[in-house]
Amino acid sequence: MLTIGWRKIYGGLMSETILLDEDSYEADHVKHSVGGFGGHIFRRAIHLSMAIIPWLYYWHGEFIAGIFGINPIDFVILVLFAILIHPYF
């Protein structure tokens, strides 16, 4: 048996540790991901952009925001809003 190191919470109470057969455990995270492969890639891109976006903002933020005719803070707000509403479209 394979013991998973976390516990499920039901109604505020913790149940026993979950036990799985070694044959029933699948390490393929894409199968268990919301949105399948597309959702998996989208979340990976978001996580990678967390390293790139601050660099772009501090070095090129005024130039990029100027393309859209807004200031850098408003541009960041628009990007965050687009990321938040993306799953609904």
Image: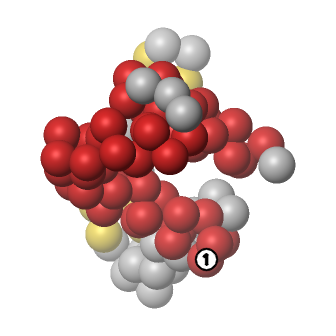
Residue drawn 17% across the image and 47% down it: 59
**Amino acid type, residue under disc 1 in the picture:** Phe
Q: Where is 13 relative to 43, above or below?
A: above
List the single residue furthest toward the top: 12
Q: Position of residue 82 (x, y in %)?
A: 62, 40
Q: Position of residue 4 (x, y in %)?
A: 30, 57
Q: Where is 3 relative to 8, above or below?
A: below
Image-based side of 29 in relation to 56, left or right: right
Residue that mark 1 sits on: 37
Q: Position of residue 10 (x, y in %)?
A: 54, 24
Residue 22 seen by the camera: yes
Image-based side of 63 in relation to 26, left or right: left
Q: Mark 1: give few (<14), some (14-19) or many (20+) Cα within 10 Å.
A: some
Q: Nearer the viewer, residue 66 or 43?
A: 66
Q: Nearer the viewer, residue 2 or 55?
A: 55
Residue drawn 48% across the image and 23% down it: 74
State the quadrant of the N terminus.
bottom left
List the single residue furthest toward the right: 89
SS type, badge 1: helix
Residue drawn 54% across the image and 33% down it: 69
Q: Nearer the viewer, residue 47 or 24?
A: 47
Q: Nearer the viewer, residue 75 or 36?
A: 75
Q: Position of residue 17 (x, y in %)?
A: 34, 44
Residue drawn 61% across the image and 64% down it: 39
| Render colour scheme | secondary structure
